[in-house]
Image: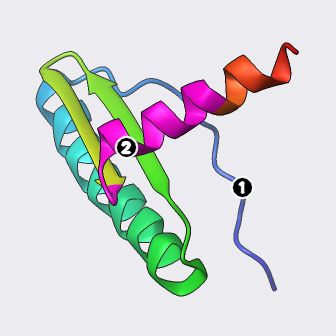
Amino acid sequence: MGRTKLEIKKIEDKARRQTTFTKRRQGMYKKANELATKCSAQVAVMAFSNAGNFSYGHPGVNTVLRRYEAVGEGAGQ
């Protein structure tokens, strides 16, 4: 049998919310790294919390963002 669906709602306790954010961010970065490694993909992830911002990129966030911008500029032609 599958998992029970849980209601998604805001975590009211700030400390618990930050802990959850940190754990989930690490999991998201791990998945992004796996995608980049297994598929030779360029991946960028940006996550913003109330405590600050975080980014992960393979080969680097700026490299991936420049490529994204270049594709966007070419799409308008």
Residue 48: x %, y % from top left: 31, 24
State the residue at coordinates (21%, 15%): 50
- Magenta residues span 58-70
Q: CA distance from mark 2 to mark 1?
A: 38 Å
User: Picture quarter containing residue 52?
Assistant: top left
User: Which residue is at the front of the view, 57 or 66?
Assistant: 66
**Residue matched to label 1:** 5
Foreground disc of the pair 2, 1 = 2
State the residue at coordinates (78%, 78%): 2
Is 64 colored magenta in this rendering? yes
Residue 18: x %, y % from top left: 18, 34
Residue 34: x %, y % from top left: 45, 77
Mark seen at residue 40:
none
Looking at the figure, which quarter contains the C terminus? top right
Amino acid on which disc 2 is placed? Thr
Q: Residues within 10 Å of mark 2 (few under 14, many from 20)?
A: some
Looking at the image, the residue that sits furthest to the right is: 77
